[in-house]
Amino acid sequence: MRCKIIFVKRIDFESLWDQLLAEGRGSITSSEIRDDTGGSAEAIRAATSNAIAKGLLFSPTKGLYVPVPPHYRSWRVVPADHFIDAMMAHLDCGYYVGFLSAAAHWGAAHQAVQEYQVVVDRHVLDRDIERVRLRFHQTRHLRGRDSVRVSGPEAMLVVATPNQCAVDLVASPRWGGGFSNVATVLAELPDLDGERLAQLADLRARPIAQRLGWLLEQAGAEVDLGPLELLARSRTRTALLDARQTRGGDRDTRWKVLVNAHVEADS
C-alpha cells in the first residue's frame, strides 16, 4: 500500500509584513492575507495579533491592517494621512479631510493640529490609535462639498479645498479651535476665491455668509469680499457672531453681524 506524503508549506507571516513595505502597499485586509498566505482564520488572527504586539502592524478598523515601517516602530502607528484613504474605502464611507487637518495640508495651520479631522457621510466612531487621534464629523451633504484628491506623504487622500475649509471652519468654529484661531487660519489659507466662497456659504445656514465675511475682513484675508457682501445684504436678519452666546455686542452694518465674541487673529 502506497502512502501519499503531503508537504505543508510553512506560512511566514513576518515576511509578508516586510513584503508589504517593500512593495509600497500601505494596507492589507484579512481576506488579502488569506489569499496571499493560504492561512486559516485562526492562523491569521494569531499572526496579526502577534505582529501588533511587536509593533509591526496596527489595525485602524476591523479587518484592515497597516504595516509599520521601521522609522515609525517607536510610534507603533503611522500618521493618519498614510492610511485614512484605505480606511475609508474599507468602510465604504465617503469622506474628505477637513477643518484644521485640511488647513494644515494647505500650509495654513498656525499651530500643531492635535487631532486628525475627517468629514464623513455616515457615522464613524472616533478612535485613538496610539498617538493618532481620529475625529469624524458627519454630514448628509458630502456630495455638495468641494474636495480634491491629492498625493499625501505615502498615499492618495481626499482633502477639502481651501474654500470649503474656510466655510466649514466658520460653520463649526469649535472644530477650528474657536473664532480667534479660525480667523488666523482664514488669513493663511491660499487661493481663496470670493465668488466660490459665496456659493458654498449660500448652501449652508443663512448666518454663515455673514460670519464668514466678517471674519475674513477681520483677518485681513486677501480675497474679494464683494460676492459675500452681496449675499450678506440679502439677509433680512442680523446674525449673532457666536450663536452660543445670547448677550449682544456691537452691530456691524456691512455684514449684519452682532459681534458678541472677542476675536483676535494671531499675526
Image: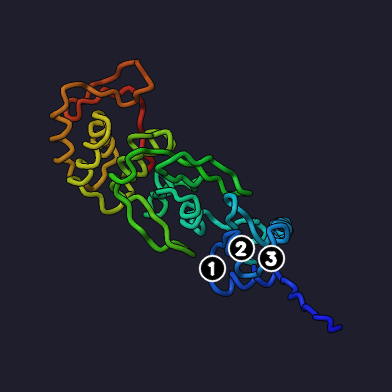
Side (left or right) of 97 relative to 215: right
Q: How is the image coloured?
A: rainbow
Q: Amino acid at mark 3?
A: Gly
Give the percent coordinates (x, y) of residue 239: 25, 24
* Mark number displayed over residue 67: 2
Residue at 84% x, 81% y is 3
* Mark number displayed over residue 209: none
Q: Which residue appears farthest toward the right when viewing the image? A: 1
Give the percent coordinates (x, y) of residue 128: 59, 44
Q: Mark 2 vs mark 3: give the one in front.
A: 3
Q: Which residue appears farthest toward the top when viewing the image? A: 247
User: To which quarter of the image does residue 151 belong?
Assistant: bottom left
Q: Amino acid at mark 1?
A: Arg
Q: Mark 3 vs mark 1: give the one in front.
A: 3
**Which residue has dot 1 on it?**
25
Q: Who is closer to the viewer here, 258 or 209?
A: 209
Residue at 15% x, 40% y is 227
Q: Quadrant of the N terminus?
A: bottom right
**Which residue has dot 3 on it?**
39
Q: Earlier in the sequence, mark 3 or mark 1?
A: 1
Give the percent coordinates (x, y) of residue 152: 44, 61
Q: Is disc 1 surrounded by few (<14), some (14 to 19) or many (20+) residues within 10 Å? A: some
Q: Which residue appears farthest toward the bottom when viewing the image? A: 2
How far separated are the C-alphas under marks 2 and 3? 18 Å
Count of marks, rendered view: 3
User: To which quarter of the image does residue 11 belong?
Assistant: bottom right
Mark 1 lies on a secondary structure that is loop
Give the percent coordinates (x, y) of residue 18: 64, 71
Q: Who is closer to the viewer here, 106 or 267?
A: 106
Side (left or right) of 178 relative to 259: right
How far separated are the C-alphas under marks 3 and 1? 20 Å
